[in-house]
Amino acid sequence: MEIEIREAALDELKKVQFGEREGIRILAEFVGTCSIATDIELQVEEKQADDEVLTVSGIHFFVPELSLESLPSKIFLDYKQGFGYKISSAEETYGYNFKLKPRQEK
């Protein structure tokens, strides 16, 4: 899998204070309802055992194996002030208004 971060998203991600072993987890799950959709979440977390790790512009992305099945081989991550993150591919847009969830306290 490949992630291309657009300039606006990269600028926003550089504001995040990541811990030493933290990155952004991309959770994606295909939802088979009357309309075809993929639920996606972005969250600051530590790497887990089944994650594929992608490092783009110094930012680590953790994508669980199950999420890889629900996403295309290349996604674009963009950001628009007031609207949040957008995830798309060359073929389609997976969603707008994604918020980066902060790490959960242990």
Image (cartoon, rainbow, N blue to C red):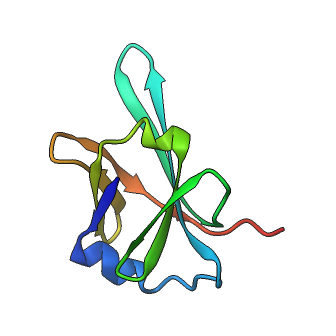
Q: Position of residue 68 (x, y in %)?
A: 44, 43
The C terminus, quarter of image: bottom right
Question: Is 87 located above or below residue 102 in the figure?
Answer: above
Question: Is 58 located above or below residue 102 in the figure?
Answer: below
Q: Position of residue 39 (x, y in %)?
A: 46, 38
Furthest residue in direction right, as rendered: 106
Question: In front here: 34 or 81?
Answer: 34
Total numbered badges shown on the rendered structure: 0
- Which quadrant of the view contains residue 25? bottom right
In the figure, is residue 88 to the left or right of 91? Answer: right
Furthest residue in direction top, as rendered: 34
Could you tell me which residue is drawn at 37 percent across and 41 percent down?
71
Furthest residue in direction left, as rendered: 90
Could you tell me which residue is drawn at 20 percent across and 40 percent down?
92
Question: Is 52 located above or below residue 102 in the figure?
Answer: above
Question: In front here: 83 or 104?
Answer: 104
Q: Position of residue 95 (x, y in %)?
A: 33, 46
Could you tell me which residue is drawn at 26 percent across and 76 percent down?
8
Could you tell me which residue is drawn at 64 percent across and 78 percent down?
21
- Which quadrant of the view contains residue 94? top left
In the figure, is residue 89 to the left or right of 34? Answer: left
